[in-house]
Amino acid sequence: MVMIKLRCKLGEEAATLCVRITTSSPTISLSALESQFNSTSPSPILQLSIHISTKTSLHPSRPLTFCTSGTIFTTSRPAEGHIDALALGPLGPGLVHTKADGSHKSISLGNLRIHRARQANDSAPNLLERPDTSFITVPSQASGEECVVTHDISAARLFAFAEQVSPEDLRVGETYAVRLREDYLGTMWWCWGGLEGELKGRKLHAFSEGFCCAGGEERPSEEEGWVIGEDVARLVFE
């Protein structure tokens, strides 16, 4: 989904996350692609990996955790079929080949707008109790480590939303590029700490400092022991 881009003043960033995308292989065999496409094999013909690392941080030794719901940072589940995180448009036109005359051939991975029915607990104060809500922990800046979210793409999935393009339309030697759309990078809630560390067993309250993207909840009392969100405008994705 397209994220609400809230900007803090220069120098007021709490943390900056570096996001990059890689592919499992620089080449794809056309014969293998056509064979898998015709057999509807679920095996991945391509993997797209999203790498997230902490570039700068006010607390270099602390990891941070952010909500990934509705973003490319959420791994797809088999039950979702082709309606996965990639189908919501985070890769824009998808895989794009630029021809010698400047025109383009694109393999779209989807640009859907999903309207889901309201479910019980959609407005639960504890974000962990809300359906379809997921989180990821990014290692601390000091660790030098990163987290990786990998999307498996079968031949059938690759062409599920590709209008007027099929495996037969590809040619040996064609080069395709893919990039992340900046307006799809972000989150509606984040905090300091790791899911398997200081946040384990804690309740994550929907309230956050600054603009409250997860709902209009009031700040909980300190005695209740909630973890509240940090200001989303101060977490920068680049």
Image: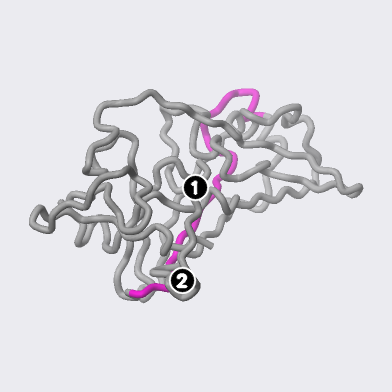
The amino acid pointed to by label 1 is Met
Q: Is residue 76 above or below residue 194?
A: above
Rendered-image quadrant of the C terminus: bottom right
- Categorize mark 1 by other alpha carbons within 10 Å: few (<14), some (14-19), many (20+): some
Q: Secondary structure at mark 2?
A: strand
The quadrant in which residue 118 appears is top left
Left/right of residue 176 with respect to residue 89 in the rendered view: right
Give 11 or 68, whichever is nearer the viewer. 11
In the rendered structure, which disc, 2 or 1, sits on the residue that comes first in sequence? 1
Please identify, in this view, whether the residue under mark 2 or under mark 1 is nearer the observer.
1
Q: Residue at x 55, y 45 (%)?
A: 47
Rendered image: mark on residue 140: none
- What are the residue bounds of the magenta stretch? 35-58
Q: Give residue 197's position: percent from left, percent from top.
A: 21, 61
Q: Is residue 238 above or below residue 92?
A: below
The magenta stretch spans residue 54: yes
- Categorize mark 2 by other alpha carbons within 10 Å: few (<14), some (14-19), many (20+): some
The amino acid pointed to by label 2 is Lys
Left/right of residue 99 with respect to residue 26 in the rendered view: right
Mark pair 2, 1: CA separation = 21 Å
Q: Residue at x 15, y 51 (%)?
A: 201
Q: Give residue 21's position: percent from left, percent from top.
A: 56, 55
Q: Residue at x 60, y 29 (%)?
A: 156
Residue topped by disc 1: 3
Give 6 or 95, whichever is nearer the viewer. 6
Q: Give residue 71's position: percent from left, percent from top.
A: 47, 44
Q: Residue at x 32, y 74 (%)?
A: 59
The quadrant in which residue 227 appears is bottom left
Q: Give residue 144's position: percent from left, percent from top.
A: 41, 72
Residue topped by disc 2: 55
Asked if the residue at tag 1 contacts the one at tag 2, i.e. Cβ–Cβ closer than 8 Å, the answer is no
